[in-house]
Amino acid sequence: MSIGGVNGAMGVDRVMALRAQILERNQALKAAAQTGGAQAAEGAAAAASAQPASFADTLNEAVKSVNDSQQQAAKLSESYERGETMDIAKVMLARQQASVGFEATLQVRNKLLSAYKDIMSMPV
């Protein structure tokens, strides 16, 4: 089996595990809705406490994630250039993931700036 096949199988297993988690959560939400609002309110409070406190925190975490992705891609590229890593597919995949993350961040920034300009140009 090729290395790509092993990575592909691991990706499929991961997707199936995520699917199972989603189905379990869906069943838990249905059960909570059927048993009453009190349990649902407790679950919502627990979910709210697990989420970041503000939009700024969420945005900061997203930018940090993109930065970490870019740093990892840079480390893999340097390692490949020094001859330490022989898996070019892994290097290229990391670089593409970093690139896509960066492009998505730029698009979000552009939308935020556009919305800000629209709000600032509104008559009061």
Image (cartoon, rainbow, N blue to C red):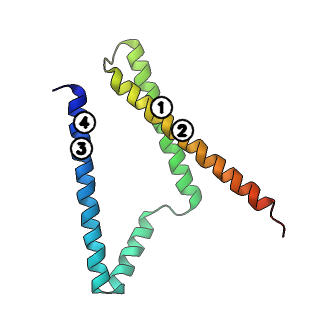
Quadrant hosting residue 6: top left
Q: What is the number of the mark on residue 8? A: 4
How far apart, in angstroms, are the residues tagged by discs 1 and 2? Answer: 12 Å
The disc labelled 1 sits on which kind of residue?
Gln
Q: Report the residue at 75% width, 61% height from top.
A: 119
The CA span between labels 4 and 3 is 6 Å
Residue marked by disc 2: 102
Give left or right: position of 115 versus 37.
right
The residue lying at 29 percent from left, 79 percent from top is: 32
The residue at the point 32 percent across, 87 percent down is 36
Question: Which of the two residues, 39 or 1, is positioned nearer the viewer here?
Answer: 1
Crowding at mark 1 (Cα within 10 Å: few <14, some 14-19, many 20+): some
Amino acid on which disc 4 is placed: Gly
Q: What's the mark number on residue 71?
A: 1
Q: Nearer the viewer, mark 2 or mark 3?
A: 3
> What is the CA distance from the residue labelled 2 to the residue labelled 3?
25 Å
Q: Rounded to the nearest whole Å, what is the CA distance between mark 2 and mark 4?
A: 24 Å
- Frontmost of labels 1 and 4 is 4
Tell me, yes or no, whether the two marked residues, 2 and 3, touch with CB atoms within 8 Å.
no
Residue with the mark numbered 3 = 12
Mark 3 or mark 1: whose residue is earlier in sequence: 3
